[in-house]
Image (tube, rainbow, N blue to C red):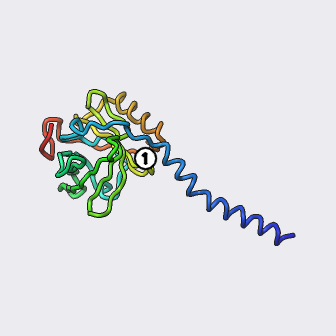
Amino acid sequence: MVKLVLRVAGAGVMAVGLLLPFACAAAAETVTALPKLDTTRAMGAWYEIARIPRNPEKKCTSDAMVLYAPGDKPNRFSMVTSCQIKAGSSDAWNATITLDKTGDGKLKLSYIWPFSSKYWVLAEDPAGQWTLIGSPNHKTLWVLSRTAAMAPEVLAAVEAKATAQGFDTNKLVLVPQRHGADAPIISGGN
């Protein structure tokens, strides 16, 4: 009798272990990219207002910015990210972004070829003043703005959009922008 109970319990644990990846995949499906992405509106400098950070960003303390520029092919563009780090100096890294062939908000970002990560443009302001970008696995998220500050009610509305797509906005880290809107730390674009 004890052996039978242990076999049934073992089978139950095994079934849960086999089904867990499918449950995670179902959660990833709650993320929806914009159906149409206008890349010309995305070009230029953006202030990082908040993020669920990737490893390279965990050392950033303030003044994070992202610059998007046209790439070497129609479906690609370049990205430069910079920030102030704890030691009082700055850090920057480059990436290439490849757009999905459908023209939607699905992107592949590559820091080192041939490796890439998926990031999706989840929402954007109709006036082009903010954008929300996240990974389909819910591990990373960015709130970007054309200005160094975002009104609290606007940030709350953007966070609500992220929550609706399954992101844990309690993990968001606010990024202090100490330089002002007229003094970007990287140049180009807008």
Q: Residue at x 22, y 40 (%)?
A: 46
Image quadrant where residue 35 sits: top left
**Tag 1 secondary structure:** helix
Q: Quadrant of the N terminus?
A: bottom right
Q: Position of residue 52 (x, y in %)?
A: 38, 48
Query: Mark 1 sits on what residue?
Result: 171
Residue 26 place in picture, x, y as percent: 54, 48
Q: In the picture, residue 65 is in which quadrant?
A: top left
Q: Left or right of 2: which side holds 11? A: left
Residue flagged by tag 1: what amino acid is it?
Lys
Q: Is residue 176 above or below residue 158?
A: below
Numbered label tally:
1
Residue shown at the point (17%, 46%) measured from the top left: 70
Is 2 situated above or below 16? Answer: below
Name the residue rendered at 20%, 45% in the picture.
68
Q: Is residue 83 visible from the viewing direction of this image?
A: no
| Rendered view: 105 above or below 61 | above
Residue nearest the observer in this picture, 97 or 170: 97
Q: Nearer the viewer, residue 108 or 186?
A: 108
Q: Quadrant of the C terminus?
A: top left
Going by the image, does 30 lie left or right of 12? left
* Residue 125 appears in the picture as rendered: yes
Picture quarter containing residue 113? bottom left
Judged from this view, the residue extending furthest toward the right is 1
Crowd band around label 1 with a 10 angstrom C-alpha radius: few (<14), some (14–19), many (20+): some
Q: Residue furthest front?
A: 101
The image shows residue 84 at horizontal and vertical percentages of: 21, 52
At x 31% / y 30%, what residue is drawn?
A: 125
